[in-house]
Image: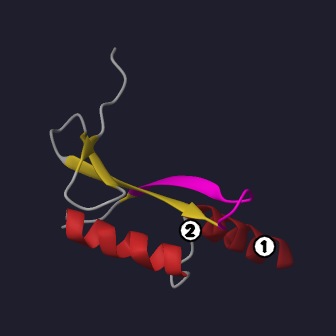
Amino acid sequence: MPSRTYTKTAYPGVFYCLNKAGQRVYYIRYEKGGGRAGKDVFEKVQGAGVTPKIAARIREEKIAGYRLTNAEKRQEVAAENLSF
């Protein structure tokens, strides 16, 4: 089975691949933290009606810090579960 092929879109840092049903699944790529400590993040963007433009907006919000990354969301949920 060949590995997935990611296709670039007109928006920087936004890629897509086709799933088994032939639908596009968008992925965003960005750096978080900057400098040597920066982390390259590659995240799946899900939801009904996601377009490259919406994925690019989500990417911008995550870079600016308005949205949590997927890893930060998981840590927050884990912390909430431990506090109870």
Residue 11 higher or lower than 7, as above or below = below
- Is residue 20 rendered to the left or right of residue 35? left
What amino acid does circle 1 point to? Ala
Which mark is in front, 1 or 2? 2
Give SS at disc 2. Answer: loop
Please tell me which residue is depicted at 17% across the width and 38% down the height of the picture.
21
Q: Earlier in the sequence, mark 1 or mark 2?
A: 2
Please tell me which residue is depicted at 34% across the width and 14% down the height of the picture.
1
Image quarter of residue 76: bottom right
Please tell me which residue is depicted at 83% across the width and 71% down the height of the picture.
82
- Is residue 69 rendered to the left or right of residue 34? left
* Magenta stretch bounds: 33-44
Q: Nearer the viewer, residue 52 or 50?
A: 52
Q: Nearer the viewer, residue 41 or 37?
A: 37
Q: Quadrant of the C terminus?
A: bottom right
Horizontal and vertical percent position of residue 9: 21, 53
- Is residue 29 rendered to the left or right of residue 4? right
Horizontal and vertical percent position of residue 46: 34, 60
Residue with the most extreme bottom position: 66
Q: CA distance from mark 1 to mark 2?
A: 15 Å
User: How many neighbours does mark 1 have within 10 angstroms: few (below 14), some (14-19), or many (20 or more)?
Assistant: few
User: How many neighbours does mark 2 have within 10 angstroms: few (below 14), some (14-19), or many (20 or more)?
Assistant: some
Q: Mark 2 and mark 1 in contact (Cβ < 8 Å)?
A: no
Horizontal and vertical percent position of residue 58: 38, 73
Q: Which mark is residue 69?
A: 2
Is 66 magenta? The answer is no
Q: Which mark is residue 79?
A: 1
